[in-house]
Amino acid sequence: MRCPFCASPSTSVVDSRSSEPDDAVRRRRQCAGCGNRFTTYERVEIPPVTVLKRDGTRERFDRQKLLRGLGRAANKRPVSDEQLERLADSIAAELRGQGTEAGAEKIGELALRGLASLDPVTAIQFASVYRRFEDLDDLEAEVARLKRQAGVPSETRSTIPSPRATVRGHGQGNKRRGHAEQP
Ligand SMILES: [Zn+2]
């Protein structure tokens, strides 16, 4: 790496850290010739993965969208954000390893398998919604709808029609239960 100030080829790295949003590695370098410091970013160059949806259309694989889908399935479950981040990364890596195009169904299967190893209930929640839909767009819309239905302040079970909600019900009880527990 040449110094951008004096073009000297002798520069050295004085600090190195990964920058979160895009997996880039940020390096502070110092020139041995003129002493100036500058920053470089190092990224892996990888072709984007295209998702082939069941309706035949294509879209770019969106790790954030996948992560949101995973996060919603894991709502109130003992699965950490970090575990979900790692799962999203491993799914992204697996897709990349298999080429530049992946079926939406394949992504769903990878997500299911990964979630099953973390928490079977989360996997079931994911499957119960995902399996009925074309892709994550539909899943997001459906989950948003369920949340609106279930999101009313009272958690009375009879107002929640989804069978999924009864599964989620096991996880509740930490809050808003005080009045119910009075003798
Ligand atoms: Zn220099």
Image: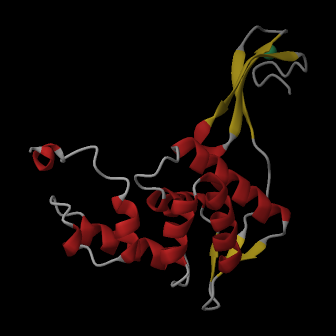
Quadrant of the rendered image containing residue 162 = bottom left
Residue at 49 percent of width and 47 percent of height: 78
Q: Which residue lies furthest to the front in this view?
A: 183
Q: Which residue lies furthest to the bottom in this view?
A: 55
Quadrant of the rendered image containing residue 62 = bottom right
- Between 121 and 131, the one nearer to me in the picture: 121
- Image quarter of the N terminus: top right
- Between 24 and 178, the one nearer to me in the picture: 178
- Between 107 and 120, the one nearer to me in the picture: 120
Task: Find residue 100 and report its horizontal and vertical position in percent.
Answer: 79, 70
Count all numbered tags in the image, as a single digit: 0
Q: Which colour scheme is used?
A: secondary structure
Quarter of the displayed picture in which ligand 1 can be seen: top right
Task: Find residue 89 and report its horizontal and vertical position in percent.
Answer: 68, 52
Residue 11 in the figure: left or right of residue 134: right
Quadrant of the rendered image containing residue 155 = bottom left
Residue at 73 percent of width and 64 percent of height: 48
Residue at 68 percent of width and 72 percent of height: 109
- Image quarter of the C terminus: top left
Task: Find residue 170 and report its horizontal and vertical position in percent.
Answer: 37, 57
Residue at 91 percent of width and 21 percent of height: 9
| 27 relative to 92, above or below | above
| 6 relative to 33, above or below | below
| 113 relative to 76, above or below | below
| 84 relative to 6, above or below | below
- Between 1 and 100, the one nearer to me in the picture: 100
Residue 122 in the figure: left or right of residue 100: left
Task: Find residue 103 and report its horizontal and vertical position in percent.
Answer: 71, 79
